[in-house]
Image (tube, rainbow, N blue to C red):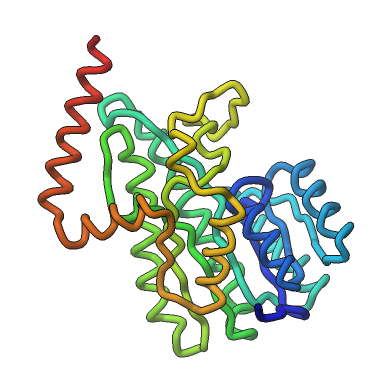
């Protein structure tokens, strides 16, 4: 395992789930980490956990949906560590609901964090990544390739960042910067406990069976490894890989399955 001592990882949405998992993995490999999120108590607890193990961590409260927050966070990171080598644009949540039941504002809220938050991260870290010849990991999803009933807002946002990753890759390659699209399937995290307003509900049940979800630390290792290898994309979980493969090579079959799923969901609501 390569030692990343002296290198720096900058991670948004680092207070829980995949973001926290990737922060721990970068730190385990020797990198200094910059932890970015809104929930200060969670961030500071994670930073203290890392410092207790002799790892260097900086916690910065930041909202990716607010103009200027990321630029301030990058400035603080550079002042503390002097460089940024890896950026994980991970902050995001999911809006769910049938198209006719969602308001335009629901879609706008989804895009403000999942798309414009990623774009703000790209803009804020661009010069630092050019200076280091680093890598930016853009958090997509298996839903960057699929679109399922009652998931239009989330799927639209993840399709958008997949397109962003593709375009950006061609623009920054001349500077020695790599772009990795991170596309996880079901991973243990809090995202399915977050409502359409972006608020976590402790009493919300996870609708996905534990048998279908990959442990966070395992997912984080695969995603970080993909970034270190400067891969174009990293699709993880067995189910996720199968879904992306089928969509790429058998789109009509997938369309049929999606139609069946939509009919099933409609009937279950009517009963």
Q: Is residue 157 above or below residue 2?
A: above
Instruction: Say how many tags the image has.
Output: 0
* Residue 61 image position (x, y, % from top left): 74, 50
Residue 154 vs residue 251: left or right? right
Q: Quadrant of the C terminus?
A: top left
Which residue is farthest top?
A: 271
How far across and how far down the image is residue 59, in percent?
A: 78, 55
* Image point (51%, 58%), residue name: 118
Depth check: 86 or 234 in front?
A: 234
Q: Is residue 119 left or right of residue 101?
A: right
Question: Which quarter of the figure has residue 121?
Answer: bottom right
- Please state if 57 lies on the left or on the right of 261 as rendered: right
Which of these two is toward me, 204 or 96? 204
Placement of 122 over or under 133, stated as above or below = above
Residue 29 lies left or right of residue 144; in this view the side is right
The answer to whether residue 109 shows anywhere in this view is no
Image-quadrant location for residue 53: bottom right
Image point (63%, 85%), residue name: 131
Q: Quadrant of the N terminus?
A: bottom right
Please tell me which residue lies in front, 102 or 53: 53
x and y percentages locating residue 88 in the rendered image: 58, 63
Name the residue rendered at 68%, 75% in the picture.
84
- At horizontal 57% and vertical 56% (from top left) the residue drawn is 218
> In which image quadrant can residue 55 be found?
bottom right
Residue 73 image position (x, y, % from top left): 71, 61
Could you tell me if residue 216 is visible in this image? yes
């Amino acid at each position: 395992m390569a030692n990343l001592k002296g290198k720096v990882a900058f991670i948004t949405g680092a207070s829980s789930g995949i973001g926290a998992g990737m922060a721990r993995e970068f730190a385990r490999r020797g990198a200094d980490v910059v932890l970015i999120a809104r929930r200060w108590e969670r961030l500071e607890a994670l930073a203290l956990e890392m410092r207790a193990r002799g790892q260097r961590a900086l916690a910065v409260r930041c909202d990716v949906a607010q103009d200027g927050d990321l630029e301030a966070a990058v400035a603080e990171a550079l002042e503390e560590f002097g460089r940024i080598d890896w950026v994980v644009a991970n902050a995001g949540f999911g809006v769910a609901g049938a198209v006719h039941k969602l308001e335009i504002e629901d879609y706008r809220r989804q895009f403000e964090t999942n798309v414009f938050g990623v774009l703000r991260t790209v803009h804020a870290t661009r010069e630092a990544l050019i200076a280091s010849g680093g890598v930016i990991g853009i958090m997509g999803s298996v839903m960057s390739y699929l679109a399922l009933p009652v998931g239009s807002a989330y799927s639209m946002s993840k399709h958008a960042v997949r397109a962003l990753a593709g375009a950006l890759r061609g623009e920054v390659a001349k500077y020695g910067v790599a772009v990795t699209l991170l596309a996880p399937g079901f991973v243990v995290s809090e995202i399915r406990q977050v409502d359409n307003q972006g608020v976590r509900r402790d009493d919300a049940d996870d609708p996905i069976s534990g048998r279908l979800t990959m442990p966070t630390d395992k997912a984080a290792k695969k995603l970080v490894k993909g970034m270190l290898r400067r891969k174009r994309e990293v699709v993880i979980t067995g189910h996720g890989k199968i879904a992306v493969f089928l969509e790429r090579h058998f789109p009509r079959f997938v369309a049929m399955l999606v139609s069946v799923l939509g009919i099933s969901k409609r009937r279950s609501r009517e009963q």
